[in-house]
Amino acid sequence: MGTSASSKGPGAGVSLDPAWLDDIDIPNQNPSQEDTPVENSPIIAPPARFSNARRGMGEYVRTGSKEALRKSLGHYSKVGMGGSQNLARRMRTSSKVATGFVSAFRSLREESDFELGRVISDLRESGANANQIIDTVIDYVCPQGGSIDEISVRDSGRAALSEFMDVNPDADIAKLTDDQIWSLTGLFLGNEVFTRVQLDIGQAFEKQNVSYVERINRLYEMRDYIQSEISTQLNALRNKENQAINMEKLFEKTIQNTFEVYEVEV
């Protein structure tokens, strides 16, 4: 986890919801009718869209104030991304991959002839290490392209699986319980939101006169804070909905509800 961003972040005058997202191919998923692009007029980003968000993030980096962090995230969503619903829609690749994680781990547990299960079994018999198994799962669930979103979901997936296995060393990823699957998927989604924020307004971390150690600590604190809210919202939706729910929409709603909490601060 670094403190620098790869660019200055998205600017004004561009679509908040780039059409190319719908061209990302998610492996081992059948597109639904809801995946069909809808021809709407694009929402164009306003000037200085992230100015208040970056200002608040800078205050958080300097002081560690959770209030400043919440306000920054609220401004980021409400103004910079056109509201929590638009932000969740922008992150639809994350929601699709989260759906893939749930589907894959349920199939690993319940289907004896599941393709991924056979591959993992062969890897184990050949003495493969945890990283090789993680990479195999990522290849099965995540897209292979080189766009920012495609790279992000692969990195977030690896991070989530590594963290989950560190915390649950005795867990068998081929036989995870529903609670474990939701926990793992929540880690992935939290990493995705954290990464999205970092890409767009993480430059604020570079411009503050604080030590490297303090900046790293603030990054970890922000990630944990976001993951906690994602987990809260995901569990609330999970407990309210039945098994027939559209999983992709559930994960989009999780992101939307998370940022609605932050938007209350601004």
Image (cartoon, rainbow, N blue to C red):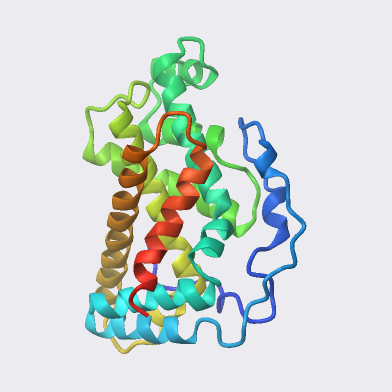
Which residue is most to the top? 112
What is the quadrant of the C terminus in the image?
bottom left
Q: Picture coordinates of residue 143 (x, y %)?
A: 61, 42
Q: Picture coordinates of residue 92 (x, y %)?
A: 57, 51
The answer to whether residue 166 is seen in the rendering is yes
Residue 132 falls in which quadrant of the image?
top left
* Depth check, front residue: 58 or 88: 88
Q: Picture coordinates of residue 66 (x, y %)?
A: 24, 75
What is the quadrant of the N terminus in the image?
bottom left
Residue 216 appears left or right of 106: left
Q: Is residue 124 above or below residue 90?
A: above
* Depth check, front residue: 166 or 46: 46
Which residue is most to the right? 39
Q: Picture coordinates of residue 136 (x, y %)?
A: 50, 31
Residue at 54% x, 36% y is: 141
Residue 44 falls in which quadrant of the image?
bottom right
Residue at 28% x, 62% y is: 225
Q: Is residue 213 above or below residue 134?
A: below
Residue at 40% x, 25% y is: 128
* Depth check, front residue: 165 or 262: 262
